[in-house]
Every structure is written in structure tokens, then in C-alpha cells.
Amino acid sequence: MTEQELAIDAIRRLNRAQIAYLLTGSMASNYWGIPRTTHDLDFVVQLPVQSIPSLLHEFRDDFYLDEPAVRAALAPPYQFNAIDRRSALKIDFWMLRSDPFEISMFERRLRVSFLGELTWIATAEDVILHKLYWDSLTPSERQISDAAGVVAVQSDSLDPAYLQQWAGELRVSEKLNKLLVGEIKPKST
């Protein structure tokens, strides 16, 4: 099973379970920007306690998903994962927190056709900001290159006011401005 096939499978399961989610991370930057090989599959989920059984049911056959870990994710660090038994690939699930940026990102998510499946995905602006924010926590050339790839592909359709507002809040304005003027470019493959 490839990462793309795993993404399709996970999206179908989340849709069937009626779990509110958004696809983020490298798969989202691949959608909006310059695709690269990734082994990451990241979802932000809004998972009330009463929806946990539906999630567990949908992922029961082909995944290792630990119920205590899912329930523990209702508290910090707000994260759990599922391991695909067929491929050993991992899906990271991040619980939607009450952080203002995360709430804004979740409210702005778009429903698009991703790999042929209707999928809730982070907007291009939110992918850029999220990548820059994660780079500020743990510097990574991949995060910056992914953000630069989204800017390169989506530059004419981006909302500069939204980007600047949240870049200031997230303290990533300097890197955002370098991306927007082309000082930071996507890594060539």
C-alpha cells in the first residue's frame, strides 16, 4: 500500500464514521504546492468522546489503533496514531485544540476532490502558516520547502491579509515575507 492509497483509505473511513477532520501536513502541501515523496499522513480531528467508538469501529480491521491512546489524546499532547497493518505506515491524528489558529484553520477547511475522494483539507494559506509555525518549533528544511512550494504554485490566489495577520500572531512574519518575495524558494528535486 502506498501513502496515497493509505490516504484514500483513511479519508473513506473518516467520512463513513462522520468524524470532523482536516487533512494537513505534507499531503496537504502536496495538494496545494509542489509534490514530494512523504511518509507522513496527518489529520486534525474534532473527536468528542461519543465519536470514539465510531472511529475505532472504522479502523478496526486493518489498523492497530489503541483505544486507551485515543482516549488519552483528549488531554495533552492531544495526539494518537494508527498503524496500518498492511504496510506498517503510520497515520498521525491530532485533536483539535482550543488554540485560536487551529480553530481558524479548522473553520476555513475546504472540501475538495483529493486523489478522487471528497476530502476536508486545510487551505493553502493555513498549510503555509502551519508549516512555518512547525519550523519555528523544530527547524526543518522540509517544512520551509513545503511552504515555499505552496507559495510558488498558489501565489496569485493567496489571501495576503490573512497570511500577514496570522504570521504576526504565530511569530513567523519574517519567514513568510521572505517566502512571498521569493527569497526562499522550494527545494528542487
Image (cartoon, rainbow, N blue to C red):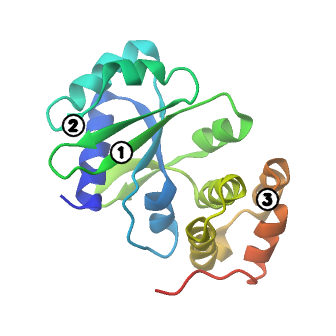
- Disc 1 marks a residue whose amino acid type is Ile
Q: Quadrant of the N terminus?
A: bottom left
Q: Which residue is mark 1?
A: 91
Q: Is residue 74 left or right of residue 159?
A: left
Q: Earlier in the sequence, mark 3 or mark 2?
A: 2
The residue shown at (22%, 23%) is: 57
The numbered disc on residue 172 is 3
Q: Which residue is mark 2?
A: 63
Residue 73 shows in this picture = yes
- Disc 3 marks a residue whose amino acid type is Val
Q: CA distance from mark 3 to mark 2?
A: 37 Å
Image location of residue 167, percent across then percent down: 79, 56
Image location of residue 144, percent across then percent down: 63, 69
- Disc 2 marks a residue whose amino acid type is Phe
Q: Are marks 1 and 2 in contact (CB under 8 Å)?
A: yes
**In this view of the protein, which residue sits in the foreground, 65 or 22?**
65
